[in-house]
Image (spheres, helix red, strand yellow):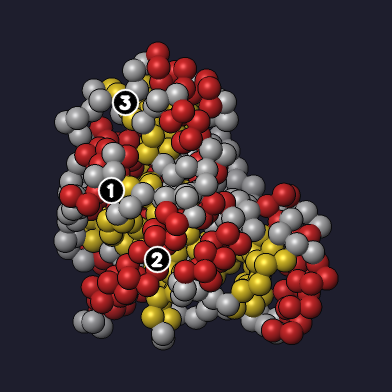
Amino acid sequence: MNVLLLGSGGREHALAWKIAASPLLTKLYASPGNPGIGRLADLVKLDIADHSAVAAFCQEKKIDLVVVGPEGPLVAGIADDLRAWGIRVFGPSKAAARLEGSKGFTKDLCAKFNIPTAAYGRFGDLASAKAYVEKTGAPIVIKADGLAAGKGVTIAMTLEEALAALEACFEGAFGAAGAEVVVEEYLTGEEASFFCLCDGATALPFSTAQDHKRVGDGDTGPNTGGMGAYSPAPVMTAEMTERTMREIIEPTMRGMANLGAPFAGILFAGLMITDQGPKLIEYNTRFGDPECQVLMMRLKDDLLVLLNAAVDGQLAHMSARWSDKAALTVVMAARGYPGTPEKGSVIRGLDEAAGEGAEIFHAGTAINGGALVANGGRVLNVTATGATVGEAQRRAYAALDRIDWPQGFCRRDIGWRAVEREKAGA
Ligand code: AMP
Ligand code: GLY
């Protein structure tokens, strides 16, 4: 098969790594890709927003499958447009990608199909949103409705913060994404990321992970796209997984089919495991970044076979097998992240650092004058497996410490919750 992978981050490098290992693969193309992906694929310059240009490339190169990494093109309808040209695509339609593209859409779906989630209100103007917040009180959560690159959520511990967040949203801090706002109940518990591979009718559980969103050790400092992750998430016991499937995922699949927008692709449920059980925080309609990196390290089966089954509506006959090992990834970011990262510093020693069960995925790198340089906020994902999360953590940090990049930084405590659990013998 000829495959075109769209995207340029660590998630896409991990997908490329796994796709490249498939005996079904003839040739892999990636656009725009990154230097790490460039070792596994031909990198092509395409304007991904120009769906006809992508389709023309697919026809010219006889692409059998397009795999879409990020949410932006999905929400913009790339899957529908390519399918209209007869091209097979892994990724949901525009209508199904509303599960990520509109938080209000997902909340209304939950209300209609009785899916457990935080109590909420949807507002299109400041006055009514303020009135709701004043009535409910803090802590409370304010969310821009649309895609805001992970920055549209404010956890307001006081009424003043909540009102300021509402004002910022309606003043255009998130552009069109903030023209509508979801205000919701503050949930407490442990968070987990739960993945399902979906073909429109069947949802196949696709393992679990835990992300570390805050930039600093001990979960302090501003939110980021994710500073590290590990898989599996110990909080997702067999019982919790069964409840999540029954109470959240299956009603979502039925609900979306019922609305004429069956979901096919990867469904990523952000869950809060509360005293009353799992509640949906949000859906993403793509793999998590960096969660994908740890999932790919543990997936024993051929990813291309599974993606094909999802595209062809054949998941009812499939299973996915996972290594018993834990996987853990540590993000190395450029100084300044999650604000404005410094670009251009030289990174050395990656080939020497990998090995011994460690893989280094490129997230934001470029080649400049023959040297590998930082070219984004999150730059490298140093990933390892181990018999325990503790062992995977030791291996990942040992590899990371062999990398020669003084301008990079990372959290030193990725996996701490699971490591503490392991130490306590739980
Ligand atoms: P999101 O961008 O929707 O993933 O939200 C970012 C983070 O905000 C989530 O990972 C949670 O840690 C937190 N969050 C979102 N909604 C809630 C909620 N209703 N209660 C508590 N925390 C939340
Ligand atoms: N790591 C969180 C995300 O991909 O949305």
Please, what is the three-letter code of the amino acid marked with disc 3?
Asp
Circle 3: element type? loop
Q: Is residue 365 visible?
A: no
Frontmost residue, 202 versus 334: 202
Which residue corresponds to the image point at 64% horizontal and 81% vertical from the top-left?
A: 139
Question: Does 146 sit above or below residue 26?
Answer: below
| Residue tagged 3 | 64
Q: Position of residue 280 (x, y in %)?
A: 46, 69
Question: Does 417 sit above or below residue 39?
Answer: below
The mark that comes first in sequence, 2 or 3, is: 3
Q: Is residue 257 left or right of residue 144?
A: left
Label 3: how many Cα within 10 Å (few below 14, some 14–19, many 20+)? some
Label 2: how many Cα within 10 Å (few below 14, some 14–19, many 20+)? some
User: Could you tell me how far apart the alpha carbons at marks 3 and 1 are, in whole angstroms?
Assistant: 22 Å
Circle 2: element type? helix
User: Could you tell me how far apart the alpha carbons at marks 2 and 3 are, in whole angstroms?
Assistant: 32 Å
Q: Is residue 125 visible?
A: yes
Locate the C terminus and report the quarter of the image it occupies. Answer: bottom left
| Residue tagged 1 | 296
| Residue tagged 2 | 251
**Viewer-nearest of labels 2 and 3?**
2
Q: Position of residue 324 (x, y in %)?
A: 16, 61
Q: Position of residue 355 (x, y in %)?
A: 22, 43
Residue 208 lies in quadrant: bottom left
User: Could you tell me how far apart the alpha carbons at marks 1 and 2 are, in whole angstroms?
Assistant: 27 Å
Circle 1: element type? helix
Please, what is the three-letter code of the amino acid marked with disc 1?
Met
Locate the N terminus and report the quarter of the image it occupies. Answer: top left
Question: Does 404 sit above or below residue 29?
Answer: below
Please, what is the three-letter code of the amino acid marked with disc 2?
Pro
Frontmost residue, 107 versus 411: 107
